[in-house]
Amino acid sequence: MGRIVLNRDKCKACYLCVDACPKKVLEEDKTVNKLGYYPVRVNNQEECIGCAMCARVCPDIAIEKVYR
Ligand code: SF4
Ligand code: SF4
């Protein structure tokens, strides 16, 4: 099982990572972050395979680490 380290306060809510994730792990959060955006949150942690596609597409480096 994989795991990501997400810095929600860096996220600008473009949701590129939501579309890039092959396992539908990520979704929109319900509360705003420090930048005033609704960032992504980890929804299905158990489904993460650690492929790092989310981190690769993120323009803001909000997904800081990926563990496989
Ligand atoms: S790609 Fe990065 S900035 Fe865009 S929603 Fe995902 S974590 Fe946030
Ligand atoms: S590492 Fe892969 S499976 Fe896990 S959240 Fe990112 S894109 Fe989805």
Image (tube, rainbow, N blue to C red):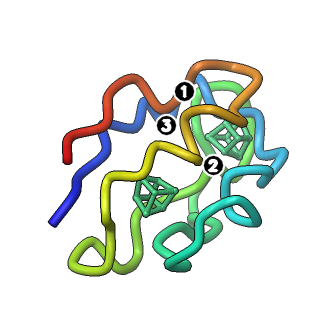
Q: Can the viewer see residue 15?
A: yes
At a point 21% along the width and 78% down the height, the residue shown is 46
- Residue at which label 2 appears: 39
Disc 2 crowd rating (10 Å Cα; few below 14, some 14-19, many 20+) is: many
Q: Of helix, strand and loop, which one carries label 3?
A: loop
**Which label number is shown at residue 8?**
3
Q: Name the residue rendered at 57%, 58% in the picture.
A: 31
Q: Are marks 3 and 1 in contact (CB under 8 Å)?
A: yes
Q: Which residue is mark 1?
A: 62
Task: Please say if the residues under marks 2 and 3 sit with CB atoms less than 8 Å apart.
Answer: yes
Say whether disc 1 or disc 2 marks the residue closer to the N-terminus. 2
Q: Is residue 50 above or below residue 22?
A: above
**Residue placed most toward the observer, 29 or 55:** 55
The answer to which quarter of the image holds residue 42 is bottom left
Amino acid tagged 1: Ala
Disc 1 vs disc 2: Cβ atoms closer than 8 Å? yes
User: Does any atom of ligand 1 lie closer than 8 Å to the CB of label 2?
Assistant: yes
Asked whether 40 or 32 is in front, the reply is 40
